[in-house]
Amino acid sequence: MFRKGAAVRLSAAEVALFYKLYPAVLLYTNQQLGLARHVTTMTQLMAMPAEAQYELRAAFYAHRQLLAAFVQENPQHFSAEELALVASWQHGVHGQFYVLRHLQRYTVFLDVHDPPKAYGVLALQDDFADLFPQVPRLIDTMLLPFHNHITYDGQCQYYNLVFGRGITRRLNESYQRAQVHSGIITSLPVAAQAVTPREEEQLKWYLRNARQRKMYRDEILALIQHNRALETLYHQEMGRVHARTYSGQLRDMGLSGVWFAILEGVPIASGTTHQEVEQAVQRIVPQHKWPFIYTFQVQEPAHRRSAKRSKTR
């Protein structure tokens, strides 16, 4: 949840630096491509209509190689540190994003790709919570590195779309999936992120419910085939799922307190104690499949356990 007073913008000094560097790059782009020939100064550039500035910006992203030429020529006589910041913009990410959540440290921009990536973005002069009071919101913009942060270029193309509950739920699921894959990306290039995907967490997320197990069946198989060490985790997680299903049925049969062992979704042994079940498993199951066994005890209904505790007091 967004909290007022949170540091969700670049500092005032950083914003001033951005608006010193970025327009200079656009002016250079305009001069090199000969787009608006009457625009030769920064003042004239800033006075261009918003639509013309947007077209110039699009031309810059289509010819991003001009960044290297700008740094080489240094027409504005920037410092080495300022030129390094300009050069880093070659790692900018241009495209469509869902402005998804306003958090304390940044606003989450979720891209439209598969697998999705979530970026923690800082605003410039105006807070994103003020620019986008209703989220999610689909926009087209450019994310740019700025020292150890990610900001945007100050311009967006808006899409007037209304998102229902179903789409919002899917976006939230994509956000969770992005967190599992790569965390929240807060610096560019992405390869520089310290966060690395954890395949165990990915697999657990895919297996979380029946809908996701069906939706990500291919991804689950690919993970297990890529890393056989995950096969045990898969069987343990699925054993937990099957145990929840069987527990109610077994409890209704009057088998509360009994231990069971599951292998590949099938109960294969039972006993009055955990040790008894383990001994049965070792007798009938090939040893290489022992790690895949999931054991559980059928619990009594909660109201009965409460009643028993009351009687003992």
Image (tube, helix red, strand yellow):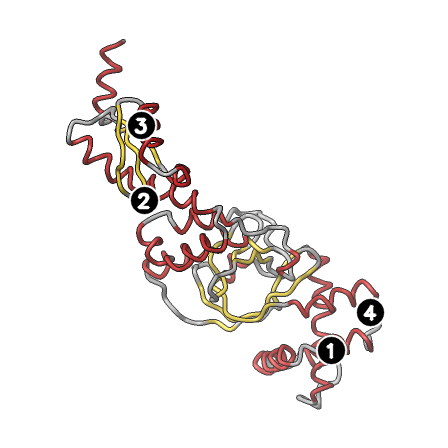
Q: Is mark 3 on a helix, strand or loop?
A: helix
- Give the residue at mark 3: 277
Residue type marked 1: Met
Question: Real-space Cα distance between discs 2 and 1?
Answer: 69 Å
Question: At label 3, which amino acid type do we have?
Answer: Val
Residue 157 appears at what percent x and percent y?
A: 51, 73
In the structure shown, which secondary structural element does the residue marked by tag 1 occupy? helix
Nearer mark to the viewer, of 1 and 4: 4
Within 10 Å of the Cα at label 4, are there few (<14), some (14-19), or many (20+) other Cα atoms? some
Q: Mark 4 points at which residue?
A: 78
Disc nearer the start of the sequence (3/2):
2
> In front here: 261 or 66?
261
Disc 2, SS:
loop
Q: What mark, if any, has residue 264 been given in the picture?
A: 2
What residue does disc 1 label? 42
Q: Residue sitting at 40 percent across and 37 percent down?
A: 287
Q: Check disc 2: other Cα within 10 Å, few if <14, some if 14-19, many if 20+.
A: some
The spot of residue 246 in percent (x, y) is 23, 37
Q: In the picture, residue 269 is in which quadrant?
A: top left
Instruction: Determine the residue positioned at 77% across, 76% down.
Output: 70
| Residue mark closest to the camera, 3 vs 1 | 3
